[in-house]
Amino acid sequence: MLKNKRIILGVTGGIAAYKACDLTSKLTQQGADVKVIMTESATQFVSPLTFQALSRNPVYTDTFDEKDPQKIAHIDLADWADLVIIAPATANIISKIALGVGDDMLTTTLLATQAAIYIAPAMNVHMYAHPAVITNMKLLERWGYHFIEPGAGYLACGYVGKGRLEEPKTIIQAIANHQAESLVLAQKKILISAGPTREEIDPVRFFTNRSSGKMGFALAQAAAQMGAQVTLVTGIVHLETTHPNITRIDVTTAEDMYQAMVKAFPDHDVVIKAAAVADYRPKQTFKDKMKKQSGEWHIEMERTKDILQALGEQKQRQFLVGFAAETNNHLENGRKKLNNKHLDAIVINNVGAEDAGFEVDTNTVTYLNKYNETTELDNATKDKIAQHILKLVMRDMGDDKG
């Protein structure tokens, strides 16, 4: 997978920099074209000449050392690369990337590149567990950076624990595996709905639900990282989309979402309705704020359009996936919804379970397909659950059963 790939290897200032020499050698042996960028601190551990000899390319250490007056070096490198590997990645470089700092050759190149970036951390076990480092890594993951977790063992500082730079062979294999996965959805167009809808009562009041949109956004991010062109139709949420493969459509009401989904539906291969859409809306709305009065206030509700039912009835070539937020009889209710709405698969979400469902970062779900095959996905981050769901969808799309 890495033959003929143009790779930037960023080496930062940690004792594990010596392993980057072996990584450079192995990448070159696999046929990759490797150019090394070293931070000033990294040069204290390994000489640039070492990397030059191993890569057979110039080594970059200074933003202002413009080797070719016709080009701006860090922009030229950023555009040249197919992928970037940072190994070892210190807590400092992770923090600088997360903050958008561009104060040396490596960080300015990272800011400018559109290539996939793989980060292999290496640091003291307590540094790796520090809340700031964890927060920065989570942020970068949301932005689409890929992490290769460090190994556990004896560290240079004398501690034993997690923080040792993963072995070069393992780093290469992890990147090759991810590159292969990234091709899985390259020719697919995926439509995803996310978040809650709002149904207005008056200018200051509305009905909504507890959906945060995190599951739908995780699906959109994962699909985009696998190469798909994603259309994300979302209710009002406090989440951002940053991946260039995601086209975002913001809506408010169930009717807004219905119109957006139905319009986009014919042009997509896979449709995943993860949004929590209101089943009812107020039959009457008020232009002015309703004042508090004595006695009760009764609001008559009417049904909204069933988006999933409509898509199921219009379905031709699309693979249609629904979500079922349940608190009891999960499998039975999910199976009924799958059959009634003409779905290819359904993701059943026990929203009453601890660390699952609305407003949290983790989930526990059951994936059920139209062949009545169930797959239990144990509690994990919504990012990981999203990846598993998409792999199951691709598996079922390729099946020739029935």
Image (cartoon, rainbow, N blue to C red):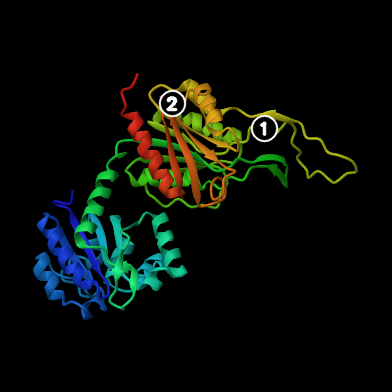
**Label 2 to label 1, Cα distance in Å?**
30 Å
Do the residues bearing badges 2 and 1 touch, measured as CB atoms within 8 Å?
Answer: no
* For residue 147, side relative to residue 31 (left or right): right
- Across and down, in percent, residue 386 comes to 42, 44
Q: Residue furthest bottom?
A: 44
- Across and down, in percent, residue 94 comes to 36, 67
* For residue 378, side relative to residue 43 (left or right): right
- Across and down, in percent, residue 257 comes to 55, 35
Rendered image quadrant of residue 326: top right
Disc 1 is placed on an element classified as: strand
Residue type, numbered disc 1: Tyr
Label 2 crowding class (10 Å Cα cut-off): few <14, some 14-19, many 20+? few
Residue nearer the viewer, 343 or 334: 334
* For residue 35, side relative to residue 300 (left or right): left
* For residue 210, side relative to residue 136 (left or right): right
Residue type, numbered disc 2: Asn
Task: Name the mark on residue 280.
Answer: 1
Residue nearer the viewer, 108 or 175: 175
Whether residue 106 is visible? yes
Task: Name the mark on residue 372.
Answer: 2
- Across and down, in percent, residue 236 comes to 57, 46
Rendered image quadrant of residue 376: top left
Residue nearer the viewer, 338 or 321: 338
Disc 2 is placed on an element classified as: loop
Residue nearer the viewer, 375 or 248: 375
Kindly report which numbered mark, 2 or 1, lies closer to the viewer in this rendering. Answer: 2
Residue at horizontal 35%, vertical 73%? 124
